[in-house]
Amino acid sequence: MTLNDINPNQTVVVHRHRATGMIRQRLMDLGIMPHTTVTMIRSAPLGDPIEIKIDNTHISLRRTEAARIEVVAIAPPEAC
């Protein structure tokens, strides 16, 4: 699954980047690194870009950039 596939208010953990070169460096400079928790906030009205949240920072990414970031869904806490 990629960051491009998640829904608003869904939280995931970055697994790895498939980006290379300058795009990879930009994503890492923005704080999108392996083992980082990311929450999808919303998508623009026409679908591109998306807004994500890392810690207290909101970042806008193009869908093509988000499609290069592999993520793992966080399991919701089980109800008692």
Image (cartoon, rainbow, N blue to C red):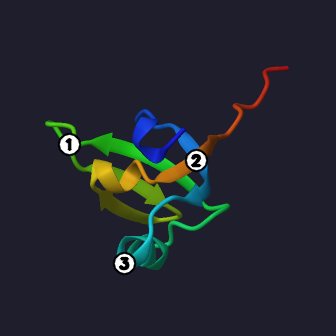
Q: Earlier in the sequence, mark 2 or mark 3?
A: 3
Helix, strand or loop at mark 3: helix
Q: Residue at x 50, y 72 (%)?
A: 31
Q: Residue at x 67, y 61 (%)?
A: 35
Would you call the spot at circle 1 few (<14 residues within 10 Å), some (14-19), or many (20 or more)?
Answer: few
Q: Which mark is residue 71?
A: 2
Q: Residue at x 27, y 54 (%)?
A: 62
Side of 23 relative to 31 (left or right): left
- Image height check: is 64 above or below 56? above
Q: Earlier in the sequence, mark 1 or mark 3?
A: 3
Please identify, in this view, whether the residue under mark 1 or under mark 3 is nearer the observer. 3
Q: Position of residue 76 (x, y in %)?
A: 69, 31
In front of the other: 58 or 73: 73
Q: Amino acid at mark 2?
A: Val
How far apart in space, not on screen, are marks 2 and 1 (Cα)? Answer: 21 Å
Q: Residue at x 36, y 78 (%)?
A: 22
Side of 42 relative to 47 (left or right): right
In front of the other: 77 or 32: 32
Helix, strand or loop at mark 1: loop
Q: Which mark is residue 44?
A: 1
Disc 3 designates what residue? Answer: 22
For the view shown, which residue lies furthest in the left direction? 46
Q: Position of residue 20 (x, y in %)?
A: 44, 70
Q: Amino acid at mark 3?
A: Met
Q: Amino acid at mark 1?
A: Ala
For the view shown, which residue lies furthest in the right direction? 80
Please identify, in this view, whether the residue under mark 2 or under mark 3 is nearer the observer. 3
- Image height check: is 28 above or below 46? below
